[in-house]
C-alpha cells in the first residue's frame, strides 16, 4: 500500500487553528510591546534592564517576547485541533499590530 | 585596520542580516502574491517548499538582526561621553542630540528602531510557522494565503522603513 508523507496530505484536511493561533499570538505580542513602551514613557512602569549597557529596551522587549510566546502557546494549545473562523482573527491581528505601531511612534508619547 | 570592530558589527547588522531579511521577505511576498494555486500531479503546490524556506530564512535573519542590534550595536551607540569631551564622534547618540537639526535621529528614528523590529520579528515568525506547518495549504486556502501575505507585507514595510532610518542615523553618526 502506498504511503503518503505528512506534507502530501491535502492541506484543507488540516484544521487552521494553529495558523490562527500563530497570527493572533503575534498580534498580542506586538500589542504588548506597545503597551510596555507607553507605560514606560508615561512613567508608570519601567521593566528592569536585562543588560545594563543597552538600557531599559532590553527589559521591555524581553517582557513583550514572553507575552508573545505565552499567548501563542495558550492559543495553540486551545486551537491546534480546531477550525477557527479566520475573519475575526485576521481583523484582531491587524488591529493589534496597528495599535502596537501607533504606541511605539514617538510623537504619540508627547500626548501622554 | 580599514574597518573597526564596531563598524564591522554595524555592517553585519544592517547590510548583512537586515539586507538578507529584506531580500527574503521581498521574494516571499512576491512569490505568494504572484503564485496561483497551481498544483502538480502529486497534489503539492509548486514551490511551496521554496516559499517556506524563504519565509523561515527571513524570520531567522530578522531575529539575528534584532538581537545583534539591541545587544551589540545599541550599547556603543548610547554610551555617554565623559564630562568635558568635545569630540563626540565616538558617541553617536550624544553627537546627534548635540545638534538640533539632527536630534530627531535619536528622538524619532532610533526610538522607533528600538522597538518596531521586535514586532516585525514576531509577525515574521508567525508567517514562517504557518508556511512550514501548512506548506501548500498557504497557496490553496484563501484565508491562510491572505493572512500570511498580509503579515509578510506588514513586515516588509516595517523592515524597509526601519532600514531607511538606520541608514540616516549611520550616515550622520556612524559607529566607527
Image (cartoon, grey):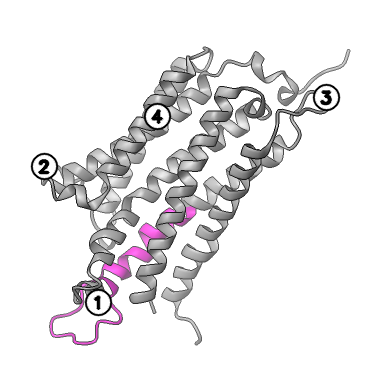
Q: Secondary structure at mark 4?
A: helix
Q: Given the image, what chain letter belongs to the residue carrying mark 2?
A: A
User: Splitting the image into 4 quarters, where does residue A9 fall?
Assistant: top right
As drawn, is B107 to the left or to the right of B25?
A: left
- Give a yes or no on whether discs 1 and 4 share a subunit: no
Closer to the eye: label 2 or 4: 4
**Image quarter of residue B109:** bottom left
Q: From the top left corner, tell me how far across and down residue A104 is, in percent.
A: 27, 47
Q: Give residue B42's mark.
A: 3
Subunit of label 4: A
Of pointers 2 and 4, the one earlier in the residue sequence: 2
Q: Secondary structure at mark 1?
A: helix
Residue ID for mark 4: A93
Callout 2 environment at 10 Å: few (<14), some (14 to 19), or many (20+)? few
Please state which of residues B24 and B62 is positioned toward the viewer in this rendering.
Answer: B24
User: Does the segment drawn in magenta span residue A109?
Assistant: no
Give me the residue at 82% from left, 18% from top.
A3
Q: Which residues are magenta?
A: B64-93
Marks 1 and 2 belong to one chain: no
The x and y percentages for residue B160 are: 46, 55
Q: Residues within 10 Å of mark 3 (few under 14, many from 20)?
A: few
- Residue furthest out toward the right: A1
Amino acid at each position: 500500500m502506498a504511503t503518503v508523507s505528512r506534507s502530501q496530505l491535502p492541506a484543507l484536511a488540516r484544521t487552521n487553528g494553529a495558523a490562527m493561533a500563530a497570527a493572533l499570538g503575534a498580534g498580542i505580542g506586538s500589542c504588548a510591546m506597545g503597551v510596555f513602551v507607553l507605560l514606560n514613557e508615561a512613567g508608570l512602569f519601567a521593566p528592569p534592564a536585562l543588560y545594563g549597557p543597552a538600557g531599559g529596551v532590553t527589559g521591555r522587549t524581553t517582557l513583550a517576547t514572553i507575552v508573545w510566546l505565552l499567548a501563542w502557546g495558550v492559543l495553540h494549545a486551545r486551537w491546534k485541533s480546531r477550525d477557527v473562523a479566520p475573519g475575526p482573527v485576521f481583523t484582531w491581528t491587524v488591529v493589534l499590530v496597528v495599535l502596537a505601531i501607533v504606541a511605539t511612534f514617538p510623537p504619540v508619547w508627547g500626548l501622554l | 585596520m580599514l574597518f573597526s570592530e564596531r563598524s564591522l558589527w554595524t555592517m553585519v547588522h544592517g547590510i548583512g542580516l537586515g539586507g538578507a531579511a529584506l531580500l527574503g521577505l521581498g521574494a516571499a511576498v512576491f512569490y505568494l502574491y504572484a503564485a496561483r494555486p497551481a498544483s502538480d500531479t502529486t497534489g503539492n503546490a509548486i514551490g511551496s517548499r521554496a516559499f517556506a524556506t524563504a519565509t523561515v530564512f527571513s524570520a531567522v535573519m530578522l531575529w539575528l538582526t534584532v538581537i545583534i542590534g539591541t545587544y551589540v550595536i545599541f550599547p556603543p551607540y548610547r554610551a555617554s561621553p565623559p564630562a568635558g569631551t568635545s569630540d563626540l564622534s565616538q558617541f553617536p547618540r550624544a553627537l546627534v542630540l548635540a545638534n538640533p537639526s539632527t536630534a530627531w535621529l535619536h528622538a524619532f528614528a532610533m526610538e522607533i528602531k528600538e522597538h518596531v523590529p521586535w514586532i516585525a520579528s514576531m509577525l515574521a515568525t508567525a508567517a514562517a510557522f504557518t508556511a512550514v506547518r501548512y506548506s501548500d495549504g498557504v497557496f490553496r486556502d484563501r484565508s491562510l494565503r491572505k493572512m500570511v501575505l498580509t503579515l509578510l507585507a506588514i513586515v516588509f514595510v516595517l523592515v524597509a522603513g526601519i532600514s531607511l532610518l538606520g541608514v540616516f542615523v549611520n550616515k550622520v553618526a556612524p559607529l566607527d
